[in-house]
Image (cartoon, coloured by chain):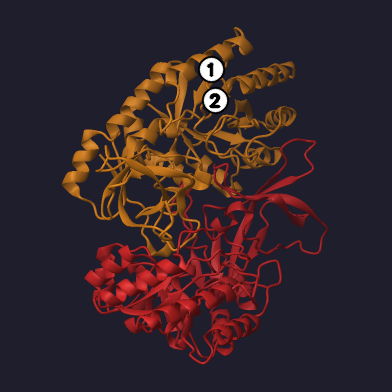
Chain colours: A orange, B red
Amino acid sequence: MATQRVIDFLATRRPEGPCLVVDLDIVRDNFRRLTGAFPSTGIYYAVKANPAPEILELLVRLGSSFDVASVTEIELVLAAGASPDRISFGNTIKKERDIARAFALGIRLFAVDSVEEVEKIARQAPGTRVFCRLLTDGAGAEWPLSRKFGCASAMAIRVLKHAHALGLVAHGLSFHVGSQQGNTQAWDAAIRDASEIFRTLREADINPTLLNLGGGLPARYLKDVPAVAAYAEAIRTSILRHFGNRLPTTIIEPGRGMVGDAGVIKTEVVLISRKSDEDAQRWVFLDIGKFGGLAETMDESIRYPITTPRDGAATEPCVLAGPTCDSADVLYEKTPYPLPVTLEIGDELLIEATGAYTSTYASVAFNGFAPLPTYVI
Amino acid sequence: MATQRVIDFLATRRPEGPCLVVDLDIVRDNFRRLTGAFPSTGIYYAVKANPAPEILELLVRLGSSFDVASVTEIELVLAAGASPDRISFGNTIKKERDIARAFALGIRLFAVDSVEEVEKIARQAPGTRVFCRLLTDGAGAEWPLSRKFGCASAMAIRVLKHAHALGLVAHGLSFHVGSQQGNTQAWDAAIRDASEIFRTLREADINPTLLNLGGGLPARYLKDVPAVAAYAEAIRTSILRHFGNRLPTTIIEPGRGMVGDAGVIKTEVVLISRKSDEDAQRWVFLDIGKFGGLAETMDESIRYPITTPRDGAATEPCVLAGPTCDSADVLYEKTPYPLPVTLEIGDELLIEATGAYTSTYASVAFNGFAPLPTYVI
């Protein structure tokens, strides 16, 4: 899966240690595929997936908008050349002084999921637009979705009425079906709930217009995933069914779906060993692990494709682990990873589809290992 | 639990955002308690627990030795003033070129748990001392111990014989009973196994002398833990029982036990909300979470004591979560955390006993949040 550009870059530059290489051509293709599949939907790139300046600058040029999680991410997007009206402050958990900072930077669109957050925004960002996040169950998603974000429908109505009463624009609703969502129908129940909330609010003379469909579009890891067009079609059908001819303005927040398959991590086999002479299973230790950027292997949630210089040889299941002295730094053990029996210490592997949620997850210095460097080409 | 010095520092300096404050007086007390309890055992501080330069410099002055996980940690310890003979390269997973770098820096003591690693060391650090790590099951430990490190006894014998044959000093054995070990008897089985391996090796005219007892000494979190002296007494009894009058040289590698209770994290309540009007449980969101330094709350393994400005008021169980847009960034949910019903947004909390395994675990920039700053006082 690694593009020839990435392979050539690694062969020419030979960076020391593990690194992430992102191919901007893939990001561009993904953006165009998304806008093609969702022609009347605003694309808000989820910056947290990968905030590399080159990625942000490309997406600014292509006309993307941005979903940010913090003031720092706002500053990154502005520095990349976007105007503040292209930014949504999508974190429902914000310090009041960070809301004030965002407002001063020109941000006028905020996520909430509680009356308490609405009150902060009314104080620090008067007159701006807010959307309320609904709680969904995340069924079908590969990365665990807890109850952390969103609130129940009845509370969402109260939250938006409160926003309206405090002079904010009760702009609409958002929800998230869970990251790396494999079911194209996963959006339907939340779209139905949202349409009912819109109707209830209109009875109170509040006219929400925004339906934020969140993220969830998958990257292709080992398993095949449905095409973006299939998600778009399922979502369009759901919106028509539930909203009829009073269609909302829609936005989506792809992160993994924009950059996941645009990145490749180069890593090196540090050690191959067994635990005992009777042990059928080899342990393969890499120079990157759970604390160096592969946090999404937590509970073996995300299973990345891996290519080796020995592909084609017979394989056997191996336990795959990282380089730190931490016992929890094991990537795949419950479901061992098939790797060539001829694999050797010093071999360089490519961990594919690692463009999202890797470089920023890396620990700052755990065990003295440096954070994962990113090369954007 | 926070010392008056820490409380005064926070009150005077008022650092913005979450931070870790480490009180060197506690580190000094812990070092003295350890040397008092283990008078004839070498103390090798596990640098990965907290590599702050001020901590390393204090421990150098006090006479500690050091267990390191990487070349960067070697450089930190040397920069703090230690000579290389006070350093053990305790990671069993080392790149061959890192072994060469360590050797060039003067390191002469290396951990191994495989024949493959022995061969790298024989090539790059000829004539040095190696100790082989034994696999243990970690029963009684709070932080999960996987099978990642160590090998079975029969393999350890083979590993040390191979080292001897390649001209290395087959110096001895190490093991680790698991971090935050609550059972003072946990060392006994491994000490027995080690004594048997020593006897077997002597039959082959190899005379190991080092028994590295690893880490595992607990910090005091919410639950009471046995005193260091109780561990020391149990270990001494085991060594006498299994080694008789041919006693090994012993070392221990305290990390958590040296700095865990010396640190306090200051954090702020960002939001308190509920998911629905019927929801009995409040969600309390802090400005630090699993990706900002509290990685050890993974699977709710480590339960930190928390103090609030409202302590004394009635409490109710709350879900405690971090500030990122990541659903997995929840600290305590399965076992909610009792917090005052009067707790308010903006309140500053102290998360106690956070001196170990926090600052370096912090992600470099996840969601745009900065890594956890450390103040050593």
- Would you say the residues marked 1 and 2 are in contact, meaning their CB atoms lie under 8 Å apart? yes
Vertical arrangement, residue B112 with respect to residue A126, above or below:
below
Q: Quadrant of the N terminus of chain B?
A: bottom right
The residue drawn where x is 73% and y is 19% is A200
For the residue pair A330 and A319, the one nearer the viewer reads as A319
For the residue pair A268 and A278, the one nearer the viewer reads as A278
Identify the element where label 2 is drawn: loop
The amino acid beneath tag 2 is Leu
Vertical arrangement, residue B185 with respect to residue B236, above or below:
above
Percent across and percent down for residue B16 are: 54, 60
Would you name the residue on which mark 1 appears?
Answer: A235
Q: Marks 1/2: CA distance?
A: 9 Å
For the residue pair B142 and B172, the one nearer the viewer reads as B172
Vertical arrangement, residue A85 with respect to residue B118, above or below:
above
Q: Is residue B23 left or right of residue A198?
A: left
The residue drawn where x is 27% and y is 47% is A342
- Mark 1 crowd level (few <14, some 14–19, many ≥20, 10 Å Cα): many
Instruction: Return the mark for residue A213.
Output: 2
